[in-house]
Structures are given as structure tokens and as C-alpha cells.
Amino acid sequence: MNPAFQIHVTGLNLIDTMQCHLYLNIAHDHLSFVILENINKEFVALEYFNIDKEDSFTQMRDIMYGNEMLRKSYRKVCIIYNFPESILVPEALYDGEMNNASLDLIYGDLRSGDSLSEPVGEWKLFNTYRVPSALHQLMNQHFPHGNYWHSYSVLLKTKNHNGAEESEDFADLIFYPNKMIIALFVGGNLKLMQSFDYETAEDVSYHLLNICRQFNLDCEIIKLKLKGLIDEQSSVFTELLKYFLHIELSDRPANFKYDPAFEEYPRHFFTPLFEMAQCV
């Protein structure tokens, strides 16, 4: 498969990947990764693949075994699963024996999979989530020393790393093709973390307006922080401007280096990938 986005620095084949960290983000409809040269803290490669949901495992397997960069060995490998079946549970209420039952209760039992969990200590939460069994087995075989996280956990760790604005109400919006993740913070406290599929720009505004209504938030006051694959000229961005006065595009982390090859794309496009390297 050919990637939808591919950024390689000049001389990538000469870089010792045993001095690099590999970060993958995997969902039903995409697989993406970045490579960080750890000594100089510089990103040297990025690839993003759109995946057909109806044949996702086969396509991901072909990418894993066919992609030159994914066949190499790395000093550190982090796999971030980006599946919507996730439950954030307060530490005081967490019971590991209830993971499967809790996931079945909220999301149903039609999709089988492996249940994983991890502490998000900074927020006093546990994240319990479900991953397709065949995919998790594939990743374990391909990266036997890989570290696993869920995208919601990484997003929360990133907020802790950067410092959440305690006095402001804001929402982080991470955009993928036909999907977005919304993380709502009110007074510095997490109120909502959820994935939403969408087909039209109006779907996006509907979800956001509905959330504002449920939490009694004023669209003219709340701040939206956008990152990921959203274009300023897109119908989605135009639709958001109709209802929300405070919209900003998140910049990529300043504590890393970026080759000029990355300047060909808007700085917010791949921020979610770069932010993974800040906290996992």
C-alpha cells in the first residue's frame, strides 16, 4: 500500500535506527507512524496510511511486513491504539476483574477482542480498552518489546505535560478522515473523552453543539483547539466558525527538531503523532 502522507529526511537510510524511537498510531481506518532520532531529538520520518475498515487486518499486516521502515529494529517502540471502545475509570473505583464485563456493558459484545488497561496516574484514572485480538497478536509478534498505550491516555498525559489551563473551558479536537476525538475540559477537569464518526461538516457542529448544551457551555466563550487532518479551507473549519468564536490550531511540540521536509504541510496536521513522543 502507498501512504497518503510520506515524509523522509535526506539520508534516512544512513541513520542508525537502534538510536531511534518508533511511535505508531493504529485505528480501524488508519495506521501512521513517526520516527524520532533520539540523540538529536529530531523527527526523521513520518508515514500515514488510510485503511479500509472492511479489510483492516489484512491491510495492516501487509503494511507491517512490507514497509521498509517497520521491518527495522529500534531502541524503543510505542504502539498507541486509537480504538473508541475505552472506559476511563477513577482509581478508587477500578476493578481489573470487571474490565471485560464493563466493556461489554457499554459497547456490547459483538466485537471480540483483548481488553487492556493502564493507569493514567496524573489524572487518577485507569483506562480500560478493547483491541482486536488478531491485531494485538500481530503487533506482539512484530514488536515483542513494544510498549502499548491508548490514544486517550496519551492525550491526557500530553495535557499534563503541557499544563492544562485550569481557569478555562476548552475542548481538544483531534481530526482524522471522517473521525474526530473530543476531549472536553471544564475548569481544568476532564468532563468528556469520546470518538465521533462524521460524514458532513454539519455532523461535526452537531456533536459539538450538543456537547455544549449537555454541559451548559457557551459557544461564544469555550475555546476549541484543533489538531490533526483538518484544513483551514475545509467545509468543517468553515462550519465551526459559524458557532464558535475562539478557535486555534495547535502547533507541534517545540522541544523537538523538524527537518524542512515537514514544512510542506500545515504545522497542526501531525501534532498528535509528534506529541506521542513527549510522554510515552
Image (cartoon, rainbow, N blue to C red):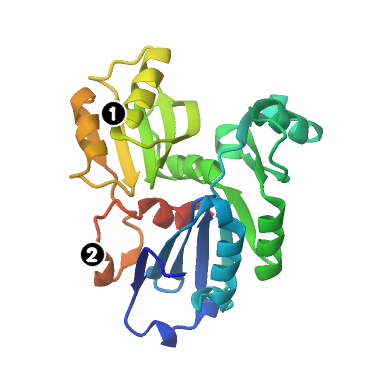
Type of amino acid at the residue the image marks with label 1: Lys
The image quadrant where one finds the C terminus is: bottom right
State the SS at label 2.
helix
Residue closest to the eye, 27 or 34? 27
With 123 as the anchor, is 180 left or right in this view? left
Asked whether, in this view, residue 104 is left or right of residue 263, the answer is: right
User: What secondary structure is marked by label 1?
Assistant: strand
How far apart marks 2 and 1 lie (CA) works out to 26 Å
Q: Nearer the viewer, residue 215 or 68?
A: 68
Against 34, residue 214 (above or below) is above
Q: Quadrant of residue 116?
A: top right
Residue that sits furthest to the front in the current view: 54
- The residue at which mark 1 appears reads as 223
Instruction: Give the residue at mark 2.
Output: 263
Determine if residue 215 is in view: no
Contact between labelled residues 1 and 2, with CB atoms less than 8 Å apart: no
Question: Residue 175: x, y in percent?
Answer: 37, 44
Question: Vertically, is 68 above or below 130?
Answer: below
Is residue 212 toward the left or the right of residue 160 in the image? left
Q: Give the residue type that dot 2 points to.
A: Glu
Indicate the position of residue 114 as horizontal and vertical percent values. 73, 47
Nearest the eye: 173 or 125: 173
Seen at 42% across and 88% down, the residue is 14
Residue 134: image quadrant is: bottom right
> Residue 97: which disc?
none
User: Which residue is pictured at 24% across the width and 47% down the height?
Assistant: 231
- Tell me which residue sits at (37%, 36%) in the image: 172
Residue at the image position 66 percent from the left and 57 percent from the top: 135
Left or right: residue 54 compared with residue 251: right
Whole-percent x, y for residue 238 in the image: 19, 35
